[in-house]
Amino acid sequence: MKVIVTGASGRMGKMLVKAVDAFEGAELVGGTERPSSPLLGADAGNIASIGALGISLVDNLSQCEAADVLIDFTAPSACLNHAQFVAEHGMSMVIGTTGFEAVEMDELKEILADSPVVIAANYSVGVNLALSLIQQAAQVLGSDYDAEIYEAHHKHKVDAPSGTALAMGRALADGRDVSLDDVAVYSREGLTGARGAGRIGFSVVRGGNIIGDHKAAFIGDEERIEINHFAQDRMVFSKGAVRAANWLLEQPAGWYDMQDVLGLHAHEA
């Protein structure tokens, strides 16, 4: 499996380079960075602290060797450009980028309509298991239990709530057979009144170097059920993304998520 990693000198990019190098049967054949990066020309392996791989960081995908799959954890506007390259070259794409506006997501789906794609808010195996558990809990507990989603990330994260928190909210809403757009509460300030029945509340923390904490709480009058996930190392996301890339090689064109990769959809209640 030949892989290109975009944003290869970034926080996640370096982890992805490590994960590709460690995955049996995978080979990094390209790494990109933004045109203004002072790291252009540097060896991707050296940047990732695993030793030289003979892959210099470039600012244009056309400078990379032909690949089977592109892994993108960048930003929405950059991801759209990378998707165009993927579509034009008959590649597969693994997308971990979050923060897309609705119009951007529509454009992304149009560009990649004929490509095999895995897109997920979180590539951790544990998080995706938690999503299944949250949906199951929501089905069993119903709206008699107040539902809240909590998430915390490092101070450099630019979008909120996190993509994973929103995925938890969607799993919870799906379990209740409602639309998250209809029941989500993203902020509370001032005289808000009593909590609305069936609402799903979100709370966000940004600070320090927190990798990612997420919690779904179901709060009843007599008990509280919480489903938690704490990321201790970003490598967990990178390993999952490379696993998804390998799985994608055997799939026809279509849009998949990490639940498909792990076979969890078949176990949903």
Image (cartoon, grey):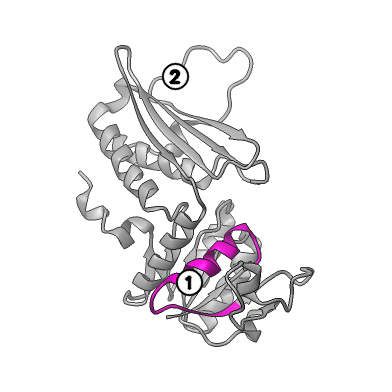
Q: Residue at x 39, y 47 (%)?
A: 127
Question: Magenta region: which residues?
Answer: 9-30
| Residue 16 falls inside the magenta stretch | yes
Q: CA distance from mark 1 to mark 2?
A: 46 Å
Callout 1–callout 2 Cβ contact below 8 Å: no
Q: Position of residue 81 (x, y in %)?
A: 63, 71
Point out which mark residue 170 bears.
none
Numbered disc 1: secondary structure: helix
Viewer-closest of 144 and 46: 46
Q: Is residue 36 left or right of residue 32?
A: right
Q: Is residue 138 left or right of residue 18?
A: left
Q: Nearer the viewer, mark 1 or mark 2?
A: 1
In the picture of the structure, the residue carrying the numbered disc 1 is 20
Q: Quadrant of residue 47?
A: bottom right
| Residue 210 falls inside the magenta stretch | no
In the picture of the structure, the residue carrying the numbered disc 2 is 196
Query: Is residue 178 visible in this depiction of the protein?
Result: yes
